[in-house]
Image: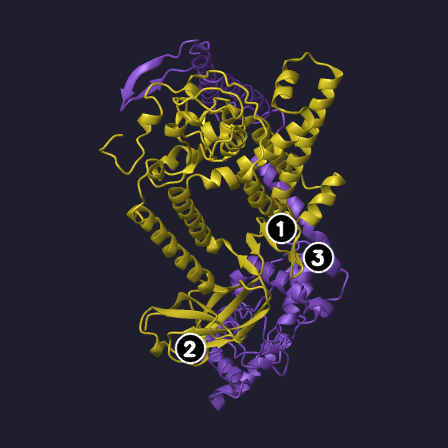
Amino acid sequence: MNSQHDDVIAVDSAVPAEVSELDKKSRREKIYTRAIEGRFQRLRLYTGWPLLLGYFLLPWLMWDGREAILFDLPARKFHILSLTLWPQDLILLAFILIIAAFTLFTVTALWGRLWCGYTCPQTVWTAIFMYIEQRFEGSRNQRIKLDQEPMSWRKLRKKTLKHCGWGLVAAFTGLTFVSYFVPARQLLPDLLTFSADLGAASFVLLFSAATYLNAGYLREKVCTDMCPYARFQSVMFDKNTLVVTYDTDRGEPRGSRKRFASKESHQGDCIDCELCVQVCPTGIDIRDGLQYECIGCALCIDACDSVMEKMGSPKGLVGYASENALAGQKTTGIPPKILGYIAALLVMLALFTSSLFNRSLVDISVSRDRGQLYLPAAGGLIDNVFEIRVTNRSDEVATYRIEAVGITGASILGEESITVLGGELFELGVRLRADPSNLPFPGTPVLFRAVSIHHEAIYAEAESRFIRPAL
Amino acid sequence: MSNFWSGWIILLTVAQLVATLWILLGNRKKPAEEIKTTGHKYDGLEELDTPLPTWWVYMFVSTIVWSVGYLALYPGMGSYQGLLGWTSTGQYEARVAKAEDQYRAMRDRYLALPVEEIAFEPKVRKMGRRLFGNNCAQCHGSDAYGAHGFPNLADNDWLYGGSPEAIKATLIHGRQAAMPAWQAILGDAGIDEATQYVLSLNAREADPAKAAKGAGHFQAYCAACHGTDGKGNQLMGAPNLTNGIWLYGGTADQIAHTLRNGRNGKMPAFNETLTEDKIHILTAWVYGLSRSSTVTATAANL
């Protein structure tokens, strides 16, 4: 261990400094994963299903006569349940992304790559595709044999069925994704009758094809070669981070032996069955130590546990453990880095909540009429004409009172209250009349205000200038 | 674009494509058994010298193939127009035509209905307001209350009549007002007397003696258009001079100026700018302005 970097796992002790095995592969070798069952795989099912169901079913949920979640890009409106977000609310999206990032950092620092192993769509969809593959082509050994066989009717049938299955899942994934932008109830019938909008249809095709390629072919390459998180997650790790590890002290020296055969004194618990390598979706050997390719899916834990059970040895030769726990050291307190992550997370959550609830439900913008700078009116008064745009950002019809503040005795001619439908923009010409003696400057600032007549707290202001001739 | 510059652009484009292809294929290495390194070593990390993955090379080549097809179909090679004949103007016009088709159907539904019936439809008010903002507000103001020389459209005082037919005729054909200049005929004294009479018509302070003389001038020269009672004539667009509403200002000086020099108000014809359905909706919007319950007639500009 490198004593200079106590808080960081010294990677060079785990991975040799020279070029690693994976990098040396100039051609990628196809990974045939072996299916395995176990408590962590059950856990992955329990976390995966609700997320999947949510993803596939949410576009069908209705709310007040429209889709509950709809990102309406042409109208520049995002509907999330009763909430409607406008382009001006983009800052909220930034907050959400920052919150997501800090949640990820905190979780990673504490429990390692939970995101990768349990919730990342790449992992989940790869698992679905592997399941389909196994259903139609059989177990790991059967698949390896099948791929080496010359083409036959049997092989063609199995391959066709697999690709049909993949295609079906991919098509539904693409369709569902686009359904968040185009109402599903309109998109699905349109697609089935070949009358869908070309843009929407192309995007369904694009996302389906991307799903098919990602989960069917690219698989672990996305994690090892493309994903930025995989590359930088190690900076969040410390010696207390839970990672999937092989207990070297207990396992080594490895060696095969018969079931329930009492091992010789010099032998470790590892029987070198390589099951942990065969089940690994990224094709690594966990016994080589912590590697950035490891997505923390715990398949090797379940594989090893099943073997240990058969061998009559205690489980957990491969398991979730922190470096400190393995070394038998106790964890002392929460490190400042994690406290920092949590603090940043809390601050962002507070900012997000307050901006969400304090965002204005009405917008106003004012522009001066370009035709005339000012107009003389009866009694030596001066008129200025403004164009006012009031946007009702709520979902309900609202009536607003238009006020002009800042000039003594100034009055609005004509309409002083407007009714705007939910989510609509209302344009209004407003003529303001003022006494020149109340106008201290050639361009006197004037504040236009739209106040909801039902909720005085809902209002918006915009400044403009009232222009008068030289006195 | 001159032939030289056209040729220059073609040369640059082709040279760049060829150079890219050469860099890509000329530097291509076969996947070696042994992994080479560039010899750079930092903190125990070595920089590898692996060839580009095959799929990457193919993707690169396919972009070059794509560019050849693209340059054949679209204008990219100097002044060559491309096989598809695509232009940005053409694309713009196609989109405008598409939008027109889309909204035309909606407006045509209103075209079939009389102005009085649709004047207060919220949709018509919204569309009308937009049309007004784009075509009329420059002169009549965003609020349609007019300006010096441009009539208020919301006060129910009409120069050429406020019936749907009259408003529509104004929009389609425009109006050309012609108030002659009377300086040469009336002279300075006559202009002053006529001014005093017009003031008296509005029950405003006027010199009675001058006003009496002015009445004579009025009956002789003005009554033909403005009527013997000065209440105007909508057939000729002659304004009512008795209601305190002044298109060109109502001070004695401004009235005298109008008398002396005449006025030539012009409302442009919109039959070539706007389609029939748009004019119909605009008519309904203007018609509704002075009749809507929320719009109150306001004091005129003096």
Asked which secondary structure carries label 3, the reply is: helix
> In x, y percent, where is residue B154?
59, 73
Task: Tell me the subunit letter for badge 2.
Answer: A
- Along the line of sight, which residue is nearer the eye, B96 or A305? A305
Question: Disc 3 to disc 1, how far (Cα)?
Answer: 37 Å
Question: Mark 1 sits on what residue?
Answer: A58
Q: Which amino acid does label 2 sit on?
A: Ala
Question: Mark 3 sits on what residue?
Answer: B107
Q: Which chain shows up in purple?
A: B
Q: Is residue B264 above or below residue A72?
A: below
- From this viewpoint, which residue is outermost toward the left? A4
Question: Mark 2 sits on what residue?
Answer: A410
- From this viewpoint, which residue is outermost toward the bottom? B208
For the residues beneath circles 1 and 2, the answer to whether they share a chain is yes
> In x, y percent, where is residue A42?
57, 41
Q: In this view, does A422 lie above or below A306?
A: below
Asked which secondary structure carries label 1, the reply is: helix
Q: Is residue B152 above or below residue A261?
A: below
Q: Which chain shows up in yellow?
A: A
Q: In this view, does B58 lie to the left or right of B281?
A: left
Q: Which residue is drawn at 33% across and 68% down?
A: A442
> In x, y percent, where is residue B300?
52, 77
